[in-house]
Amino acid sequence: MAGASERDVLVYKEMFDLLDIDDNGMLTPMEIRNLLLHFQYNPKKQIIYQMVSDLDTDESGGIDFYEFMKMMTAKLSETDSDEDITKVYNMYDSDHKGFITIEDFKNVAKELKEEIKDEEIKEIMDKIDPKNKGKITYEAWMRFQKKKDFSSIGSLTV
């Protein structure tokens, strides 16, 4: 896929698999709702179904990996604020220590009832913040979130 390295694709696949709780190769509206609830967003069903509809280009009723890649590689819209990005960061850094650790990722995975290997988490962390082995700083998180480029994945926000 143009615009995403092989490593990017592997990282996004791990994220997708973590969210795909029923392992059917598609993120359903319920899985997306559970994810949003985990991050203390409680949108109405209509909003969730609209989000899925906006991303579901093949009209399958869910978001497949290709559609997920489009979402993950598109640029953040102008309306996405630093505050929104910070909220997500703070969900991982729930004890406000100033960085996200492997344990923080494990805690999120546990809450989502999903298993993820330490090496998979390390790969995600290295992608976001290669300079701080074992932790993701707020600055690296912001840099990573703002440089995402969804539009570069062929004919593939927070």
Image (tube, helix red, strand yellow):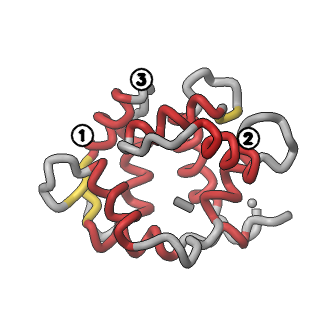
Structural crowding at the residue carrying mark 1, measured as other residues with C-alpha within 10 Å and reported as few (<14), some (14–19) or many (≥20)? some
Q: Is residue 33 above or below residue 11?
A: above
> What's the residue type where badge 1 is placed?
Glu
* Circle nearer the N terminus (2, 1): 2
For this view, does 44 lie left or right of residue 132?
A: right
Residue 120 x %, y %: 44, 42
For this view, does 132 lie left or right of residue 52?
A: left
For this view, does 58 lie left or right of residue 134?
A: right
Structural crowding at the residue carrying mark 3, measured as other residues with C-alpha within 10 Å and reported as few (<14), some (14–19) or many (≥20)? few
**Residue annotated with mark 3:** 113
Structural crowding at the residue carrying mark 2, measured as other residues with C-alpha within 10 Å and reported as few (<14), some (14–19) or many (≥20)? many
Task: Give how far apart the Cα atoms at labels 1 and 3 are.
Answer: 15 Å
> What's the residue type where badge 3 is placed?
Lys
Which dot, 2 or 1, sits closer to the camera? 2
Cβ–Cβ below 8 Å for labels 1 and 3? no
Measuring 12% from the left and 56% from the top, which residue is drawn there? 97
Q: Is mark 2 on a helix, strand or loop?
A: strand
Q: Is residue 67 above or below residue 62?
A: below
Q: Is residue 140 visible?
A: yes
Which dot, 1 or 3, sits closer to the camera? 3
Measuring 25% from the left and 65% from the top, which residue is drawn there? 137
Task: Give how far apart the Cα atoms at labels 2 and 1 are.
Answer: 28 Å
Task: Pick whichever, 115 or 39, lies toward us.
Answer: 39
**Residue annotated with mark 2:** 64
The numbered mark at residue 103 is: 1
